[in-house]
Amino acid sequence: MASITFYLKEFEHNGFDINFLKDTLPKIGVEVENITKDQINVEITPNRPDLLDQQGVIRALQFFSNEKLPEDDYKISGESKVVIEVTAKARKIRPFIGCVAIKEISLNDQKLTSIINFSEKLSSTYGRKRKKLAIGMHDLNKVEEGGLTYDAGKDQKFIPLGHEREMTLQEALKASSKGIEFVSAVPDSGSKGIPFLSDRKKILSMIPIINSEATRVTEKTTSLLIDATGTSRAAVSDAINMLACSFIDMGAKVYSCRIRRNGKEETTPNFSKEKIKIGCGAIERTLGVKILPDDAAKLSIRMGYSASKQGKGIVVEPPPYRTDIFNAQDVIEDIGIAYGYDRIKQEKVPSLIDGSFDGSIEHQNRLALAMVGLGFMEAVNSKLTNEKANFDMMERKYDKKSIVTIAESKTESITMLRTDLLPQLLQNLLESSSEPMPQRIFEIGEVFRVDGEEPKTSTRLAFAAEHSKANFSEIKSTVEAIMTYMNIKAKIEDAEDGAFIKGRTAAILAGGKRIGVFGEMHPQVLSNMHIEEPVIAAEIEI
Amino acid sequence: MHEYERKVLEFLSRNGMATMEELEEAIAMHKDSLMWAIESLSARKEISVKKEERYAATLSDEANGYLKGFPEEKLIHEIGQKGKIPASEIKNSIGITWAKRNGWISISNGVVTLTDAGKKQLSSGRYPQKDALKIIGESKNMAAGDVKPISAEISELSKRGLVTLKQHNLISEISITKEGKGALEKGEKAGLGQLSREVIKSRKWESFGLQQYDIKAPSEKAYISRLHPLHEITDTIRKAWVEMGFREVSGPIIESAFWNFDALFSPQDHPTREMQDTFFLSNPSTLKIKDMEALDSVKKMHVKGWRERWSEEAAGRAILRTHNTSVSARWIRNVAKTQEKEMPVKLFSTGSVFRNESVDYKHMAELHQYDGIIIGDKLTFANLIDTLKRFYAKIGLENVKIMPSYFPFTEPSLQALYYDEEHGDTIELTGGGIIRKEITKAMGLDKDKTVLAWGGGIDRLLLNKRVFGMDSLLSLYKNNIGWLRNRGEIKI
């Protein structure tokens, strides 16, 4: 999900007011996050990069409300003179390039900013921080006529955009802030070189990092050359199509470019998309709604498709800016959106099967109620913890190999999964230190270990009581009550555990296996935790 | 007069005054009962109580780490060494926020440098917040005089969630008043107090009479024990699914990327699969995927669908599951393998899911979800919408709106939203859709079977005022006993 901000004014120019936006945007799958005085914040899902552009959203709204028809809108006006030769070096690093020439543009400050924002957003989200896709924009009138070259090198010189001095590609990678920011998008630049685009005389851009000052785009620019490069052929051609369509919406004309790669020639942008046939039966089987061919065609048109009736179904052609439409199912989803999800009539799933609860969760639930009956409050703690809280504070030793550890965490106090419940229960008691005593608390939950190379999960019950008269015989009584409740014939034996006082620590044995431990918490542990009253506690496998 | 009160007054009338410790030692009485007696006597002015203002301080885990250096100190130290750092390279977001707030750094064109104040700070190394934290860390029970000089820092520290300071009053001296002496005399003439087996059997009450109590006197508080609110709401949700004919299932929290992502058609280069968003494990770092057949068909699905290289190694990485849909994926596969005959199969699960977040009052690293699937013949989107609306109506959420959405594993996809008009609150209840045919095929289901699937968050329901009205999810895991004792009912 990408969060993005649009200008309300731009929507209002096209006749869409706040109320319309609040109501309609969610219906086309654009979630409204927040509206301020002059901006609207929305979430764009990753399948619709075309909506990262405000122009794209306006276009979708116009289609959706029948204000726009797809007939002759998105056409390529002709061929430009731009031919790009892709060298073998560039092909090895960043194989794909697409290009489009745009003419008859009237740019103002806001349009320029908005189109640059769109291409930045495309490169960072859809383009995975420029690794998969990056976009460059040049003033076409500042580019020499004739052939361009997409190559790679180290020592070629140019003035990076926003800089004053000429430098080599390699220098520019280190000296410019964009170079520092996106260095990871050109792996092995030392050995393989850095990709660049050049005309007969000069470098136009260092790819995918920074353009050259020589072809800087300004408000006065009337013709543009846009390049997209990357590691995915689809992402590159999608980006060129989306940008070209945005310019057509702004009233400009687009001209194609030729790319020569590995002895083959192709033309970009390519607006023709494969036609897709959809039977009305398939629509009904998916959506559960009967839709006639005429209506299906109308609904498709409201999502920007060219569509016509054919037999018992329709044939559609997706618009060139859509990157996510490959088969009938993709189109059916759009037909459903145009129909309106809220209009789809509910239909009950026919089924006579009985439902059932998970037996072990139910067992835990009954045990929880028994604990509540004994006067204990239930706690739920996070399964995430750290070695200090889980072991050190409890005066317990551990073997690193036996704990489940996290590779990299954004929160310092999260480094592992808990191996015991008690440490967190004590933390809860500390958190409650100013509340009236006695305090009794319990938790039933999962704890985690590594055994060999396999993770082992087990479920435990732990409980603790804090008050001035808390002692061994009270915890023993409670443990015995729970053992009786669980129908376990348990034996009690002397045990040693750093967390408890020696001689007031008991292991619980059932069927010869140790299933738990209880006793009086050691004053060292209590003072580690800053707990000031006696605490008794138990932890048992269930 | 209550028995407890009489004992306190008697002791004080013999001794004039006492400290709390002396009273505790002299009167064999539960501390809480003694406290209650003192409070009620003092409310009736029968004793006078001298109190001292005290503060109990606790440091969070984070704060204990900060004693060695605050993130903002670490950050300026790093910048000091390197001269400048691109903002995008700085993972220490807390450090940036505070260094910025303190005016230590400036950010321009995406590059962070030290300001003069920052340089000064770096050379002096004296940071009032850290000094205050040290003082608080050393003395757990602070007098008012200790707190005052550092009150500005304390307020910053507690806003950051590093320190909690609770005021409590320590009783230093208790003495009996004139009213107290009077009440004691009156009480002695007023007859028998606490009933006993002996009084009842011997009918002593007939000759001595029974004392009349001040029924408005405060009584000792009783506290309820109960289940945790998260447990209660989860049970409500489980019950609703079972009533609708769903079978409860479960699956592992420690999961392979394969079942969490790959089986659900999530591309291997997808941003959520990066370390910043998902908890990858270092021990065990990989998990064996035992279902070779599924491994092979999922690989084919990815290569064909995303036209990208697919790495088995990346699929074997051990993670903490990011959604309960991993459980659903495993169960779709189970149903396919066991060739269950009786259709539709309706399953649900609930459990913890994990996101690698910087934890604060808005973001939790562990959350809870419910997830469901229906596998069957001739299932449609209309069936899914019906199932969801029926479920939400069952837990009391009417007026649910269905809107388009996107997930890599479903098409068409939807989300269900609940508009709480009374409180002007919108909750995203669930995301769902029809599982892509590519996935059901890779899981080995018959071609004519359809799978409806959805998943929703449990925790966020507790934030809604109509349902429960928690202001921050952090309290959910703090388990403050006072909060748990006094919390309201869950209303779904």
Image (tube, helix red, strand yellow):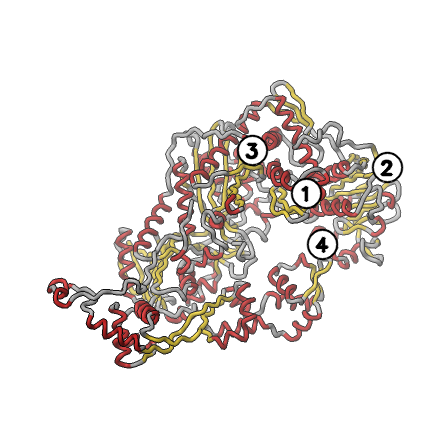
Which of the two discs, 4 and 3, labels the residue nearer the N terminus?
4
Name the image quarter holding residue B18: bottom left
Q: Secondary structure at mark 3?
A: helix
Residue at (70, 39) in percent of width and height: A56
**Badge 4 is on which residue?**
A183
Amino acid carrying label 1: it is Leu
Foreground label between 2 and 3: 3
Mark 1 Cα within 10 Å, few/some/many (few <14, many 20+)?
many
Q: Mark 2 vs mark 3: which is more N-terminal?
A: 2
Amino acid type at image mark 2: Lys
Q: Which mark is residue A341?
A: 3
* N-term mark: 1 or 3: 1
Question: CA separation, marks 4 and 3?
Answer: 44 Å
**Spatial separation of the CA atoms under disc 1 and disc 3:** 23 Å
Disc 4 or 2, which lies upstream in sequence?
Answer: 2
**What is the number of the mark on residue A81?**
2
Give x and y (percent) for residue B478.
45, 59
**Relative vertical location of residue B180 with respect to residue B328 in this rendering, above or below:** below
Please check whether the numbered discs 1 and 3 fall on a single chain. yes
Where residue A390 sits: x, y (%)?
Answer: 44, 62
Return the residue at label 1: A52
Binning the other alpha carbons within 10 Å of mark 4 as few (below 14), some (14 to 19) or many (20 upward) gives: some
